[in-house]
Each structure stands twice: as C-alpha cells, then as structure tokens.
Image (tube, grey):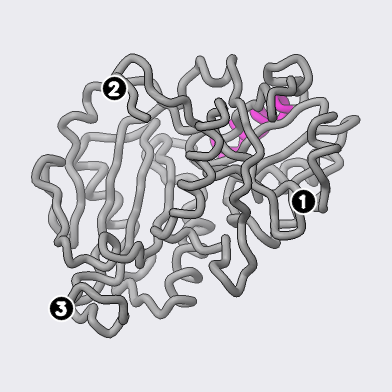
Amino acid sequence: MTYSDDQHAITAHDSEEDIRNRDIKIFINGEIVHRDQAKVSVYDSGFLLGDGMWEGMRLYNGKWAFFEEHMDRLFDSCKAVSLDIGMSREEILEALTKTAEANQMNTDVHCRLMITRGTKVKPFQHPGLSRSGPTIVIILEHSKPSTKLLDRGIKLATVPQVRGLPMSQDAKYNSHSKLNCVLACLQAEQAGADEGLMLDPHGFVNTTNSCNFFIVRKGELWTSTGDYCMNGVTRAKVIELCQHHGIPVYQKNFSLFETYGADEAFLTGTFGAQTPVSFIDGKQIGNGQAGPMTRKIRELYQTLIEQECQS
C-alpha cells in the first residue's frame, strides 16, 4: 500500500511538518554533512543484516532528556551482542552536541542515534567480516508530535505476530532488526488500524509494534510484566511517576478481555510521550479520547521533562 503526501499512514510518530528538516546535517563517523550527502556503504552490517542498535532521544532547552537512561540501554545492548561502540558516553554526548549546534537546534528535537557493526569485507553474516570498526550515525530533526493525534487517538488491531521469547530475539534489544515489528505494523494496517497490538508468547497483552502499552481500569494503571517488551525509558518514567504520586500501577499479565473493558488506554514512547488509544479491534476504549488518567500522566510527565531539562 502506498500513500500520497496528503494521505499518509497514521502512526504514533506523526509530527507537525517542519520545512527546516529538508536541510538538516547528519553525523556519520565523525563528519557532519548535509542529508543529501549522508550515505553509508551497501556493505554496512546494518544495511545487510540489521546488525546494530539504536536509541531515540529528545532535546529540550539544550539538554537531552534522560540521557543516562538511554546510554544504559544502548551500552547494555551493544555489550550483549559484542558490538564495540568505540566511544564513551561523554564522546557520544559531545557528538550529539556538535550535531545539534551544526543544525542550530536547541529544543523540540528528535534524535535517532544508530550504531552498527560497520562495513563488511564480504556480504555475509559472520560478525568477523566487519573489520573496520562501527558505523555511527546521528540524525536530528525538528520534531513536535502532532496535536491532531492527541485528540484523535490511535486505533489498534490485535495482530498474529507476537513478541518472541528471549532466547529467539529478546525484545529488550533496541536493534536495527525490526522485521518482527514491521510485520505486526503491516498486519494492523491491513486490518484497518494504525498500529498492531502484539501479544506475548502466552497470549497476554504485551506492547504495540512501536510503543509500550498501558490500560486504565478503575483508577489503576496496568502494563505488561516487561518480560517480552522493550524496556522503554518513557515506560519506566511513567511507572516511577505513578509510584511517586500514589497512583496504583501494576506490571502484570492481562488479556484482551480486560483490555477491551478498559476505561482508558495509551501508548508510551520517547517521541510521543503518552498517546491515547481510541479503538482496539473496532471497540471504542472509554470515550474514544484521552481520559482523565491519561491527561494526568501526561501533565506529570511534562513537569518531569521540564525539571530534567531546565535551561
């Protein structure tokens, strides 16, 4: 399925258009170049195999929100797959800062930091064929979540594609290998929804193809156990906020039965923060818009961002 410029697929990452992004500069292995000149080799491990890790981060008032938490996940993931980044946290921060300065960016900026195993000498699988060191790319864009999406909400469809067991491909890796999630997204789209609601291997509600998932029932916030989903930074912050402000929050197994009867549902992610869910499998959730708990969590999270990123 293809879309025209004025009829694109709705996603949890919809943003307001910003023409400045047509001329952004991108960091590639120490060089900062115009996006039209930003290229990596067709022999790169990320292109050939999806062999790499990435982080999505946001810049507010010149400061990267929850930088240390993102670096914890990135360095843990790269260590687990024996991928030597070749840079310290401080050096990554310096590269991010230089890229932001080159683009004259200070706030409402989204980053995709990508680390691959690097260029291979032959187009085959073995990691030992990557001998030139990692490929490091930083893409920064002026980016504000679409306000229309906050009013409309996301429509989900439960999909047959599941988040697998840790010994197949642990969902905690924020890896370039996203085919599993792409398949879930396609299945949802073909069912007439915006994103796929993915179950875990035991049939319990887990996550969507791109974000973590929460429901609200009788004043309580529920999310999955975390055993089969991305350990999202925003997910963790929402749980911490609830615990700090006396909002009952549970990481637990729950089924579609409880989900369909939820008072509210929302997604969490670095880009959209908290995105309301309006329909699941054609069933309206609550009043089909952001409910009072979703709005409260969004306000608490915005306050946390302001505290974290004070100018």
Task: Give the extent of the magenta segment.
Answer: 294-308
Residue at x-position 46% and y-position 33%:
13
Residue 18 badge:
2
Which element carries disc 3, helix, strand or loop? loop
Is residue 119 visible in the rendered image? The answer is yes
Dominant secondary structure of the magenta stretch?
helix
Q: Position of residue 306 (x, y in %)?
A: 54, 34
* Furthest-bottom residue in this view: 128
> Looking at the figure, which quarter contains the C terminus?
top left
**Mark 1 to mark 3 CA distance (whole Å):** 43 Å
Q: Within 10 angstroms of label 1, few (less than 14), some, or many (20 or more) residues?
A: some
Residue 53, compared with residue 156, is above or below; it is below
Q: Amino acid at mark 3?
A: Val
**Quadrant in which the N terminus appears:** top left
Q: Quadrant of residue 83?
A: bottom left
Residue 279, compared with residue 60, is above or below; it is: above
Closer-to-camera residue (160/248): 160
Q: Check contact, mark 1 vs mark 3: CB within 8 A.
A: no
Q: Which residue is mark 3?
A: 121
**Horizontally, is 292 left or right of 306 in the view?**
right
Q: Position of residue 97 (x, y in %)?
A: 28, 49
Regarding mark 2 in the picture, which secondary structure is present there?
loop
Amino acid type shown at disc 1:
Phe
Label 1 sits on residue = 204
Q: Residue furthest left?
A: 37
User: In this view of the protein, can residue 308 be seen by the observer?
Assistant: no
Q: Earlier in the sequence, mark 2 or mark 3?
A: 2
Q: Residue 217 placed where, x, y %?
A: 86, 33
